[in-house]
Image (cartoon, rainbow, N blue to C red):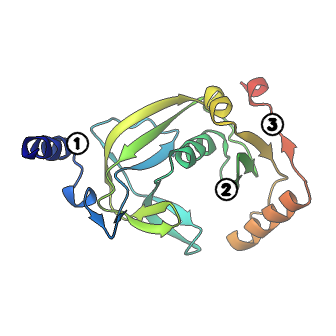
Amino acid sequence: MLFLWLTYVSLCQQLRFPIRNLLQKGGTMDKPFVLYHGTCNDIAINDYLKTFSNYNRNSMQAVNAVFATSNKTKAVYFGLRSCLAGRNSRCKLDNKRIFLSSLREMLKSTFYVYSIDPTDFRLDSKDEYISYRDVQILSVEKYDLKKAIAEYGFEIYLIPELDINKSVCNQIKQMNDYIDSNNFQKLDIASIF
């Protein structure tokens, strides 16, 4: 039994999983075993996910950070969103419906979900985590946009363009008003590519 535990510990160290994340506190994990980050950016497996300036909807401020989730389906959503969403676009995931306020000029047909070491992350909200440091990539999965939409059952909707002169909070309110009033159009991604 000790041999199996030592083998497991050795494997985890080779994969760069901290042992403290394997230990349970009060019957629950203190952090997930692994976190996921979805993006259309192709990053080498031996590289790091770099912090970048992004809007944190919880603090309502721009922050330099890496965001991740313990929910792989949500990471796939973030990957899809990075392939489709235009500059300054606001996005919302509502069950399996993805709402976008604008599309990229050059849509991307491939995205990636990176499995990353959770060590430097802290809980930001529900199943989303934030790190203010670059983070080590453990593994990567490549996805075809159209196949992922079908496999995960996502539907993509475009809402009218938002007023970018408004604050982010007001843009989010405007987006929610469009959604609540059914002011959106379903996109046929297959016809776009």
Q: Are marks 3 and 1 in contact (CB under 8 Å)?
A: no
Q: Give the vertical position of 109 relative to 74 (above or below).
A: above
Neighbour class for label 3 at 10 Å: few (<14), some, many (≥20)?
few
Which residue sits at x=69%, y=38%? Answer: 105
Name the element at disc 1: loop
The residue where tag 3 is placed is 187
Q: What numbered label is drawn on residue 15? A: 1
Left or right: 47, with 106 as reference point: left
Q: Position of residue 142 (x, y in %)?
A: 47, 30
The residue where tag 2 is placed is 88
Residue nearest the viewer, comparing 97 with 26? 26
Q: Position of residue 16 (x, y in %)?
A: 21, 47
Q: Identity of the amino acid at label 3?
A: Leu
Q: Residue furthest left?
A: 3
**Residue 1, located in which quarter of the rendered image?**
top left
State how far apart marks 3 and 1 are (Cα).
40 Å
